[in-house]
Image (cartoon, rainbow, N blue to C red):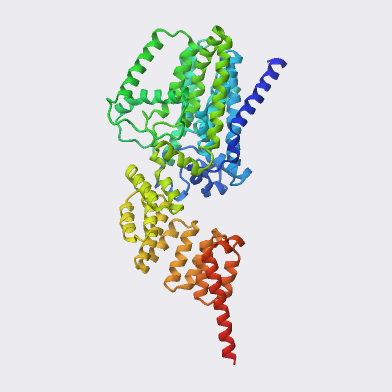
Amino acid sequence: MNKKDILSLICKYILIAILIVAAYFPTFSGEFIYDDNDLIKNNPFIRESHSIETYFSQEDGIADKRDLGEYHSGYYRPLINMTYRLDYKIWGMNASGFRITNLILHILCCFVILNFYSLLMDRQIAFWITIIFALHPVNTESVSFIVSRNNIIVTLFVVSSFLFYIIGWERKNYLIYIVSLFLFAGAVFSKEFGLMVIPLIFLYQRIFAKKRYRLSKEIISYIPFIMITLLYFLLRKEVTDSLLTPSNIESIWSRIYFAPYIIFYNMKLIFIPYKLHIFYLDYPANIFIWHSTISFLLFLLACFTLWKIITNRLLIFSIIAFLICIFPALNIIPHSSISLIAMRWLYLPMCFLLIGVGILIQKAIIARRNLALSMLIVVVAYFGIYTYILNGGLWHDNDTLIKQEVLGFDNYLFASDMAEIYFNDKEYQEAERYFKIAIGKFPYQAFSYINLSALLTETERPNEAIILLNKAKALVMTHHEKGEWYNNMGAALFKVGDNEEGLKYFKKAVIYAPNEPIFWANLGGAYGMTGDYQNSVVALKTGFEISPESVQLSANLAMTYINMEKYKDAISVLESLPVNERKENCEVLRLIRMAREGLQNKASDLDISKK
């Protein structure tokens, strides 16, 4: 490249970065949302320092290391938690910092994709389709939803590995080839999609190879890639107890039959990005539903057309590469997600599909330049504005996300979360309705039963809570969910007057979830109600070490000190709370009055005894 080309490339980089930052500007003030809370914010694994070996023995999606080996997510992505740990070291537990990292990764990925496109087609067309990729609203789930960054990272590694292999192969440069291997390893250990590098390289060699060598020589070049793949599966089997993700009830033939339906649904999201959100899509009720049948027939027709008519090798590469990259999302080889569609899964496949779009854009510009450029500007503007809107609304904060999903899109995947919002707002009737919807839709998810039991106990229906918790007892639960189960059972038993049995359950709650301050508050309060004030103080002080500003812990400890007639200690605990908490919380004010009255009475009794 000469100086003019280098300057042009730098200018393109700057413009791409500016457009991305403008479209994603609301993400800088965004919060942790949905799975971000469990997998990052409330995940002690991210806060603690670990050896590299530890990360490679960690199953992705399992926040509590005690759940390893008992509860399986089906995902093995060791490099991702490393990036979260690095983020925590840089930003602390600050959602904006984590989001900035996602944005930086997205910008870097777009830079790599621009260079990839520039090798295949006219540089101006490459620039246009890179901007389309950079601003496409479908990609907002991968960029703004922090835990979806694995899609950005795997794309960065896949495209880079593919590029370095092709350059190294054509130039016979073994150093570049080795770099490709390392990038492939990064892709594989970031997400399962990374395995698609091998078929992508094989496809490219069949279509574009400038010089054909013997197939045996080409296969030899794949052997190191295959060895890394075998290592990945061995480690995956060791950690997740499975080479593949858990299978669902659909037969292999049903999964194959419905694959075209999933492909066309995904293409609709790319070419008609409208009403985008977190999709929850299951298989149709039967194989004869009309859109599934039409999708299957259209797919067969498209394959026949591709074979008979299309002669443009780049277009053929684009379409087949798209199908290769989307293959892991088709559920032919089952994945762990409960949805068949997710916008985040399109991040990698779309960057290959846009090659074909670039060919069409180039033909349109040749035929009607002004009209084609005008349409491109309109599309880019729409994508940028829509991306900005999604970042300012859907992906900005947790409550907005959940309310839009449930109330705006009837997405009952979030019914239990919607119920919790109503529960926290003390709208118990609506909360109960959504908890019951969640249980009806997903009867195997224990947390809906557990949370509904808390509502039933709070609304003076502890017997119903006990029955519901007994129904949930046999379900698979994480250690934290078991802690919640025991805590809620303890609360319900105390409500019905069985204090001794309730205390036993509170004790088990802190064993399963020792880092949950509210469980220690409940255990301390339970000890106090049974008259065991010494153990009450021990439990409550343990909770204070975890959450020193907890109002519930302060109130329970103060009450215990009052019962022990240690009024000064009670006042000291309550006055250590922030001023606004003391002034606005009626329970705290009541306890302060009780402690002061007790202290005055004690002083009066002491004066009388002296006289």
Q: Is residue 453 left or right of residue 401?
A: left
- Residue 284, percent across and down? 31, 30
Residue at far right of view: 3
Q: Residue at x 45, y 64 (%)?
A: 523
Out of 368 and 257, give the one closest to the viewer.
368
Out of 21 and 328, give the one closest to the viewer.
21
Residue 43, compared with residue 121, is above or below; it is: below
Number of disc labels: 0
- Residue 409, percent across and down? 42, 36
- Residue 407, percent across and down? 42, 40
Residue at far bottom of view: 611
Quarter of the image that includes the N terminus: top right
Q: Residue at x 55, y 77 (%)?
A: 597
Out of 543 and 134, give the one closest to the viewer.
134
Quarter of the image that includes the C terminus: bottom right
**Quadrant of res 502:** bottom left
Residue 278, compared with residue 537, is above or below; it is: above
- Please indicate, yes or no, whether residue 146 appears anywhere in the rendered image: yes
- Please indicate, yes or no, whether residue 168 appears anywhere in the rendered image: no
Residue 197, compared with residue 514, is above or below; it is: above
Q: Residue at x 39, y 47 (%)?
A: 70
- Residue 125, percent across and down? 58, 15
Residue 470, compared with residue 335, is above or below; it is: below
Q: Residue at x 37, y 55 (%)?
A: 453
